[in-house]
Image (cartoon, rainbow, N blue to C red):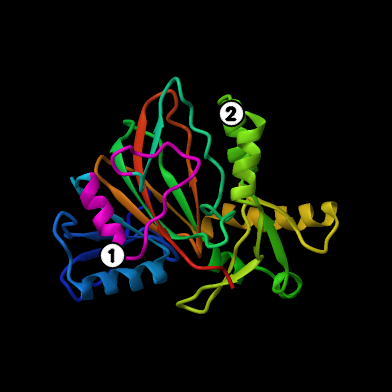
Amino acid sequence: MSEAIALPESPFGYDLYHLSPVIGTEVLGIDLREPLPDDVIHWLYNLLVDRKVIFFRDQDISQQQHIEFARRFGELEVHPFTSNDQAHPEIIHLDNDRDNPPYINIWHSDVTWRVEPSLGSILRAVEVPEVGGDTLFANMEAAYNGLDDATKAQVDDLIAVHDNEGFLAGMRARGASEEEIEAKRQEFPATTHPVIRTHPDSGKKSIYVNRAFTRTIEGMTSADADALLNKLYQTAWSPDVQCRFRWRQNSLAFWDNRAAQHFAAADYWPHTRRMERVTIIGDRPR
């Protein structure tokens, strides 16, 4: 891994390090066990919007402290399909080991099948393998900027369809009845979002389709939509728009789901990786 690029200190004395020129900054010297002043929260949010994902090391925090920190940025989501904590349903358990192989090694934005997808998520490492299990993040604003002018003109006003069929298939695999699956499909039907989203704070455009949840593009044949979507999906694979984060126990990653995609490398299997995630509700993409 290349050496991080040092940045000037924050106005609050924290040390900052870029993981790449276009995305990802570690915030060092901060203690998330204590309530942070409003001006620090405001600064962290602006840093998130600018850098797309921010990281914290050595944060031995409780589940309640994890929730309280996330809640400073908005109302929290309870995911309807995942393994949620019984005491704290806002917390998703993402546990993988020999008997439960990882399956989210795909570039995606979270819950884009919701009418109002998440603002962002804060993921904490509870147990990590000795090597492997990194998470990659891609700046989808930079990915959009890298498109040629003809493609930008083609995609700027298109609308994509998103659904949660992958989660419904998971319900079926776990033995849910077709009646239960259909009830969940009716509760969370397919929705539409712009192919190119405009960030509500920065006003910058980003690619807002992903292989996990985007199914087609309105007004296009299946073949044409698939060809265009595959071209847009591929932009996340460019190292020029990425950073890669190596986890340690008690590390946290906070990403802006509106402008970044992420990819959880599955190279550590069959070893154990246990994570806990809290997600902040966002707004309807424009």
> In this view of the protein, which residue sits in the foreground, 166 or 101?
166
Q: Which residue is mark 1?
A: 72
Circle 1: is it few (<14), some (14-19), or many (20+) Cα within 10 Å?
some
Residue type pointed to by label 1? Arg
| Residue 146 makes an appearance in the image | no
> What's drawn in magenta, residue-wise?
63-88
> In this view of the protein, which residue sits in the foreground, 210 or 160?
160
Q: Would residue 27 be counted in the magenta stretch?
A: no
- Return the x and y of residue 198 as percentages of the image width and height: 56, 74
- Please name the residue shown 50% across and 64% down the image: 258
- Please name the residue shown 40% across and 67% down the image: 51
> In this view of the protein, which residue sits in the foreground, 97 or 79?
79
Q: Quadrant of residue 270?
A: top left
Mark 1: which secondary structure? Answer: loop
- Return the x and y of residue 52 as percentages of the image width and height: 42, 64
- Return the x and y of residue 72 as percentages of the image width and height: 28, 65
> In this view of the protein, which residue sits in the foreground, 171 or 15?
171
Q: Which residue is mark 2?
A: 176
**Would you say the magenta stretch is mainly helix, strand or loop?**
loop
Residue type pointed to by label 2? Ala
Quarter of the image where the C terminus is located: bottom right
Q: Is residue 77 above or below residue 119?
A: above
